[in-house]
Image (cartoon, rainbow, N blue to C red):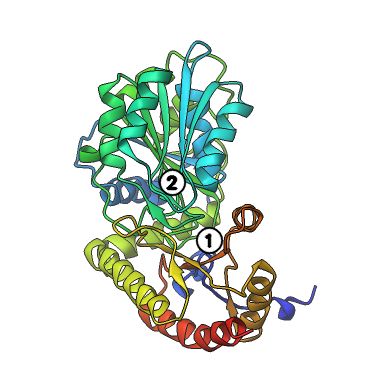
């Protein structure tokens, strides 16, 4: 195989994200047995540092699980483990990945109702309250950061509302965890779900779950959870600083190194401040372009991904051409979530593109990307 043909592009998509050379190199550290004492050397610090990133104090009643697979695997674990045969699930979607959460519930045979918002909108608490009173769910599926639209929800307020109706709250935080402060004891979701390949600056391969006491208790009562989607089984192994099934040991080595870097070298506050600074720089860039608009409403704009609505005459076909132009310049440009753009153009609306600014991407990298992208966008929009 000619690996010289593997192009090393600078990724400005919304995941996978840029991997630091030190993290790439950590993938070459020794493999190990996942039931051996060597595993504890990796997963001991992994579990500790994940809890720190989530804002959990020592002896917290939240339990952390590392789930082989993707963030979707963690989301499906929550659906299968927290909704029994007599329960109703309410899925609250503001975009494609909220729709995915809904799909997981439906395909797993859960009795499911949907509260859907137009793409680009944030969740509205008044309509959520009405839906809770009408549906009377046992489990509510929420999105913290909608990757397809760049919208961040006020999840803490939504969780409080869900709890006021006696339901459990499951939160998808796949594209924001590690890129913004997270105080789980204050937010109090019953389960918070994320993954490695976005703001943590790691390859894909692990889903992550932070389960509160009510979720743990509920999972113990739900039948037919499967095996790799059984939260109780995952937490049983996590108590031994292990994974339920054989992990990617290369990724575990990388994760141990990267989380140590985030906590003890870069520092959480600096990391989160860098994400805000990169977001603001991207917003300045978008505002400097004639006719281009930020898709997310002010006050709900993601610190990790920016979605941009383009002016006429640009369409999806031109955005895909821009992707190839940027590829030739050494960058992987994101021409927008495909199904979203198809639906928007079908409704007579202008499509969007996305800029991922998360993980270990630096301000210098963002500046170089924007300096290259600006002339390409201006030329394309000029017709």
Describe residue 209's horizontal placement relative to residue 110 as left or right: left
Q: Give the x, y percent position of residue 284.
A: 35, 78
Q: Residue at x 55, y 47 (%)?
A: 96
* Label 2 crowd (10 A; few <14 / some 14-19 / many >=20): many
Image height check: is 138 above or below 22? Answer: above
Query: Front-most of 67 and 317?
Result: 317
Query: Front-most of 25 and 366?
Result: 366
Disc 1 secondary structure class: loop
* Quadrant into which the C terminus falls: bottom right
Residue 16 visible to an observer of this rendering: yes
Disc 2 secondary structure class: strand
Q: Give the x, y percent position of residue 170.
A: 40, 33
Image height check: is 55 above or below 15? Answer: above
Q: How many marks?
A: 2
Q: Residue at x 39, y 26 (%)?
A: 131
* Quadrant into which the N terminus falls: bottom right
Contact between labelled residues 2 and 1, with CB atoms less than 8 Å apart: no
Q: Give the x, y percent position of residue 262.
A: 32, 63
* Label 1 crowd (10 A; few <14 / some 14-19 / many >=20): many
Q: Give the x, y percent position of residue 274.
A: 30, 71
Q: Residue at x 55, y 42 (%)?
A: 72
Query: Front-most of 374 and 360?
Result: 374
Farthest residue in the front direction?
348
Q: Residue 64: which disc?
A: none
Find disc 2 in the rendering and name its residue: 194
Describe residue 313's horizontal placement relative to residue 276 as left or right: right
Find disc 1 in the rendering and name its residue: 15
Q: Residue at x 49, y 15 (%)?
A: 84
In space, the residues marked 1 and 2 are separated at their CA atoms by: 13 Å
């Amino acid at each position: 195989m000619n690996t010289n043909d593997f192009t090393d592009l600078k990724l400005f998509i919304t995941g996978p994200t840029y991997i630091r050379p030190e993290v790439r190199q950590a993938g070459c550290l020794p493999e190990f047995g996942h039931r051996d004492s060597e595993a504890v050397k990796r997963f001991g610090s992994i579990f500790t540092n994940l809890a720190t990133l989530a804002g959990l104090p020592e002896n917290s009643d939240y339990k952390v699980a590392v789930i082989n697979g993707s963030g979707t695997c963690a989301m499906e674990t929550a659906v299968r483990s927290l909704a029994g045969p007599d329960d109703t699930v309410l899925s609250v979607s503001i975009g494609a990945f909220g729709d995915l959460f809904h799909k997981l519930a439906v395909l797993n045979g859960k009795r499911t109702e949907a509260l859907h918002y137009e793409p680009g909108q944030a969740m509205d608490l008044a309509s959520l309250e009405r839906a809770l009173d009408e549906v009377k769910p046992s489990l509510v599926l929420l999105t913290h950061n909608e990757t397809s639209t760049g919208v961040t929800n006020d999840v803490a307020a939504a969780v409080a509302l869900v709890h006021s109706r006696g339901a459990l709250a499951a939160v998808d935080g796949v594209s924001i965890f590690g890129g913004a402060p997270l105080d789980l004891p204050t937010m109090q979701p019953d389960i918070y779900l994320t993954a490695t390949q976005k703001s943590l600056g790691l390859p894909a391969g692990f889903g992550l779950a932070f389960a509160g006491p009510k979720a743990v208790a509920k999972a113990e009562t739900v039948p037919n959870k499967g095996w790799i989607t059984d939260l109780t089984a995952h937490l049983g192994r996590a108590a031994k600083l292990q994974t339920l099934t054989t992990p990617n040991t290369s990724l575990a080595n990388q994760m141990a190194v990267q989380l140590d870097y985030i906590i003890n070298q870069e520092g959480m506050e600096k990391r989160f401040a860098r994400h805000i600074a990169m977001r603001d720089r991207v917003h300045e860039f978008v505002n400097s372009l004639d006719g281009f608009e930020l898709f997310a409403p002010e006050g709900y704009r993601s610190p990790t991904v920016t979605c941009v609505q383009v002016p006429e005459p640009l369409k999806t076909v031109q955005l895909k051409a821009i992707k190839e132009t940027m590829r030739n310049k050494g960058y992987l440009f994101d021409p927008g979530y495909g199904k979203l753009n198809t639906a928007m153009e079908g409704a007579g609306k202008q499509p969007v593109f996305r800029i991922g600014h998360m993980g270990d991407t630096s301000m210098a990298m963002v500046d170089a990307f924007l300096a290259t992208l600006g002339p390409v966008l201006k030329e394309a929009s000029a017709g």
